[in-house]
């Protein structure tokens, strides 16, 4: 499962070129033919005007790595929807959510075979919206924002092919951003588990202590910067892109070079496994083996550890991710989108709304095996989320996230896979000692601007 700042789907994503030709939307509110991303669709799916039509027909609903653990819940949701809408049928498929997710999803869209209702993250939503493959919910379903926390609804805005803002997804569930750590390994390195650092560089200083204590027997974290870009920049309040999103500006902040210098130093000193620099693997396996001190920043990661390594779970604790210059954390909801290429768009839209309504969000987020939070206002007011008790890592994670959501914003910088990879590649060169941190940052910004210019 992916929630909060889960970046597994970002790691290793290859550059995707979505050219202007054949992309975008055309059509109107009436029947007949229109186009979405180069695919022929019902004219009512695109252009202006509210979506209308009977809620009848078969659709495909795709989630990301949820069927194994939550099959009973979602099958129940599907049955309830079908019962309330005779003539509607939902076929559920589950994607593994590996590091080729965006690539494969865009390929499906270009082949006009995108699932009707699909669980996406911000990166995938960015690519699909720009190419015109998602239903514009703000236009096709006026008032769709009403159930959701305003910050979460605001975060579901992405740019279309013309650069205009479009609400192409429903915010679904969200997590938080936490430090998950092995208390034994921290204590061995002289790091106090009860006093998590308040800045990113303070966290890096703790990584350095672990490197010196571990001496290659255990590590602080994983090396691949794809896990941290642009998340760390956002938390440090480093502006990655200009206000209009058309140019990169991160090199203008001297802290960016300092950040890269820290990453290079930590890699050289052994704070990270050498073979993890270009690996798309997250910390899950090594953390569960007691070989990495810090696990995933996703709160639900504690569930993975509990299931796979009870002995390490007994030594696991959670703390606040450094707020740094931003002063609070950000939330990155998982989203539910409706394909503009759907042959039964009214069914798809109705099911997407049913899935993300307050009742179903509250019911799922109360599952004792997850640490996720709903995005609807009424759900968050439920006592389950407001009065958390217990001292185990699960309960502590819930407490921290509940506190975060009081001040969290849903804003996070969305980079295209190509731009993100270009920045990551330069940082990796600096970490290998092949470029100075200053030169790597300069080159990263230049390459990012080339790609942003090409994208328009």
Image: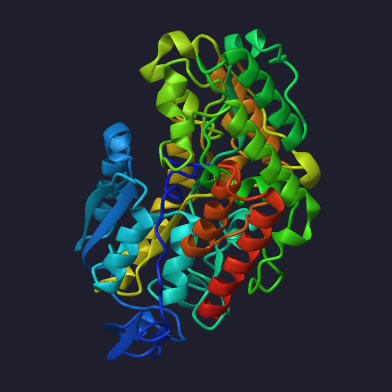
Specify whether 25 is left or right of 115.
right
Count of residue discs = 0
Q: Is residue 356 above or below residue 179?
A: below
Q: Can residue 369 be seen in this view?
A: no
**Which residue is the extreme one toward the front?**
434
Q: Is residue 294 above or below residue 233?
A: above
Percent x, y of residue 23: 39, 82
- Where the N terminus falls, by quadrant? top left
Percent x, y of residue 424: 54, 52
Q: Is 187 in front, or is 118?
A: 187
Percent x, y of residue 454: 52, 79
Specify whether 78 is left or right of 2.
left
- Where the C terminus falls, by quadrant? bottom right
Q: Is 132 in front, or is 385?
A: 132
Q: In this view, does 136 lie above or below 27?
A: above
- Residue at (53% x, 36% y) in the render: 223
- Residue at (24% x, 59% y) in the render: 60
Q: Is 175 in front, or is 423?
A: 423
Percent x, y of residue 333: 53, 49
Within the image, what quadrant is residue 278 found in? top left
Q: Is 95 in front, or is 356?
A: 95
Within the image, what quadrant is residue 86 found in? bottom left
Within the image, what quadrant is residue 213 found in? top right
- Residue at (35% x, 58% y) in the render: 118
Q: Can residue 79 be seen in this view?
A: yes
- Residue at (57% x, 79% y) in the render: 163
Q: Is residue 39 above or below residue 78?
A: below
**Colouring scheme, one of rainbow, by chain, secondary structure, one colour:** rainbow
């Amino acid at each position: 499962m992916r929630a909060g700042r889960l970046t597994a789907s970002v790691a290793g994503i290859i550059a995707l070129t979505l050219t202007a030709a054949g992309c975008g939307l055309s059509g109107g509110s009436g029947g007949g033919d229109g186009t979405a991303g180069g695919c022929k669709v019902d004219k009512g799916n695109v252009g202006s005007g509210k979506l209308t039509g009977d809620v009848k027909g078969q659709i495909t609903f795709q989630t990301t790595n949820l069927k194994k653990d939550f099959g009973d819940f979602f099958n129940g949701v599907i049955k309830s929807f079908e019962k309330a809408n005779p003539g509607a049928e939902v076929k559920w498929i589950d994607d593994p959510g590996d590091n080729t997710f965006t690539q494969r999803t865009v390929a499906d869209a270009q082949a006009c075979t995108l699932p009707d209702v699909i669980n996406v993250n911000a990166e995938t939503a960015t690519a699909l919206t720009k190419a015109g493959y998602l239903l514009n919910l703000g236009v096709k379903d006026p008032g769709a924002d009403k159930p959701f926390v305003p910050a979460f609804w605001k975060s579901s805005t992405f740019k279309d092919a013309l650069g205009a803002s479009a609400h192409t997804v429903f915010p679904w569930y969200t997590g938080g951003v936490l430090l998950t750590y092995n208390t034994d390994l921290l204590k061995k390195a002289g790091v106090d588990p009860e006093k998590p650092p308040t800045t990113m560089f303070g966290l890096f200083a703790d990584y350095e202590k672990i490197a010196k204590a571990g001496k290659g027997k255990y590590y602080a974290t994983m090396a691949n910067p794809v896990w941290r870009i642009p998340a760390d920049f956002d938390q440090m309040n480093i502006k990655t892109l200009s206000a209009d999103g058309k140019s990169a500006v991160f090199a203008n902040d001297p802290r960016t070079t300092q950040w890269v210098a820290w990453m290079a130093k930590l890699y050289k000193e052994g704070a990270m496994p050498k073979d993890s620099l270009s690996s798309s693997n997250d910390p899950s396996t090594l953390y569960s083996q007691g070989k990495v001190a810090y696990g995933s920043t996703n709160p639900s990661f504690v569930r993975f550890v509990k299931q796979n390594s009870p002995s390490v779970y007994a030594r696991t604790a959670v703390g606040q991710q450094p707020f740094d210059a931003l002063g609070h954390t950000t939330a990155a909801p998982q989203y539910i989108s409706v394909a503009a290429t759907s042959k039964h768009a009214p069914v798809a839209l109705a099911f997407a709304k049913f899935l993300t309504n307050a009742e179903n969000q509250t019911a799922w987020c109360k599952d004792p095996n997850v640490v996720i939070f709903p995005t609807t206002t009424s759900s968050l007011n439920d006592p389950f989320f407001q009065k958390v008790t217990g001292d185990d890592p699960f309960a502590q994670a819930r407490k921290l996230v509940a506190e975060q959501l009081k001040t969290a914003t849903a804003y996070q910088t969305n980079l295209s896979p190509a731009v993100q990879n270009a920045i990551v590649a330069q940082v990796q060169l600096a970490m290998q000692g092949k470029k100075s941190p200053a030169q790597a940052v300069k080159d990263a910004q230049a390459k990012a601007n080339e790609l942003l210019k090409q994208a328009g």
